[in-house]
Amino acid sequence: MKEKYKKGRGSQIQVSNRFLNAEYVTDHPEGLDEPLLDESIRTQVFYETPKKVVNKVTSPDVGMEYSLNPYQGCEHGCIYCYARTTHEYWGYNVGLDFESKIIVKRNAAELLEKQLLKKSWKACPIVLSGNTDCYQPLERKLKITRSLLKVFNRYKHQVVIITMITVVLRFIDGLDELSRDNLVRVILSITTLDDKLRPLMEPRTATAEKKMKAINVLTKLGVQVSIMNAPIIPGLNHQEIPAIIKRAAASGAMSAGYTTVRLNGKIADVFHDWLTKNFPDRAEKVWNQIKALHNGNVSDSKFGRRMRGEGNYSEIIKQLFTHSVQKYMSKTIMEPLNISKFRKGGNYMLF
């Protein structure tokens, strides 16, 4: 019996967790008298109470010093997401578990405030999120990211927001206040302008059109906006680079970055299954081009090249991106975020 495609989900399969010795599986469904009761994958929420939420980033090629992730797992379901492997540390898998079992840090704002109140803390941009999106669907109900931004506002501390959707506009008043002192930067991830590809590749994200409108609104508020054209997947979206940079620049984006796809760990199995089901006519070609980026593999953990790849395809992507940025964004300059306004120790300036 042909498996039904799970609309609204990126991953179409469950895969094993590399850290678990035993798992529930159904190797021979044809032997069952009744069909499995797994017709729909519902989102489950789990609450965690960590001792800290601000994390020092030691990776030298991600462009941030500190990150804060209020959520682990992500309902957006982006099929290529490198963060999928982090779900294995929680006992879940990188497939459907990553998209449907969401771990929430409900005391995140309290812990952020404690961090900012430390005498040893020096003002430095903190990135929301760096791993999974801080504005995923649950944020509409739980408003944890909203509470975090209130803390950043209270202490006049710098924050960088990375997101794939436009819920960021729901806290427009807070962003307005932060932008007056140049304390906030928003980075919108734009992978494709093709709205036939997007719902397959990243099913629960905003359309490119909505993102362009969000860039325009934020820019008019005085918020500095960048985009991440990431990941670039040869054979699927690499040809869109110039159009994405052009549209983003016209909407007000001041700079852009990019990464190429890397399929670490079991993500390779999830992505390959998705690729063959959605693009059977070019699956082998796309797969081989991804391998060409990483010296015959679909991933690379080497700092300095893991984010961009190497070889002919990597160089073509680099040149196409660089030329596009030079053409459409060469006249804009991003100002560094302001560290002078930070209310160290919670002290309020009267004058």
Image: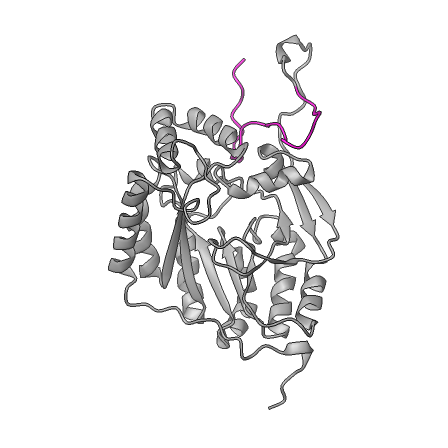
Residue nearest the observer in this picture, 206 or 248: 248
Query: Picture coordinates of residue 114 (x, y %)?
Result: 71, 67
Specify the farthest residue to the bottom: 351
User: Relative to 163, is 229 on the left or the right?
Assistant: left
149 vs 256, nearest the viewer: 256
Q: Magenta stretch containing residue 166, yes or no?
A: no
Residue 39 seen by the camera: yes
- The picture quadrant where one finds residue 248 is bottom left
Q: Residue at x 63, y 50 (%)?
A: 71
Using the rendered image of the protein, determine whether residue 43 is visible from the camera's viewpoint.
no
Residue at x-position 53% and y-position 75%:
339
Query: Which residue is found at the position 29% from the left and 57% from the top?
Result: 325
Give the quadrant of residue 115.
bottom right
Q: How many marks?
A: 0
Q: Which residues are magenta?
A: 1-25
Seen in the picture, residue 2 relative to 325 is either above or below; the reply is above
330 left or right of 196?
Answer: left
Q: Position of residue 37 (x, y in %)?
A: 68, 22
The colour scheme used to paint the residues is one colour
Within the magenta stretch, is there residue 10? yes
Q: Is residue 7 left or right of residue 112?
A: left
The quadrant in which the C terminus is found is bottom right
Residue 251 in the image: above or below residue 1 = below
Residue 63, percent from left and from top: 47, 58
Q: Who's the residue at 74% across and 57% down the image?
A: 51
Q: Compared with residue 251, is residue 320 higher up or lower down, i.e. above or below? A: above
Q: Residue 211: give x, y in percent of width and height.
A: 42, 54
Q: What secondary structure do most residues of the magenta stretch adopt? A: loop
Quadrant of image for the N terminus: top right
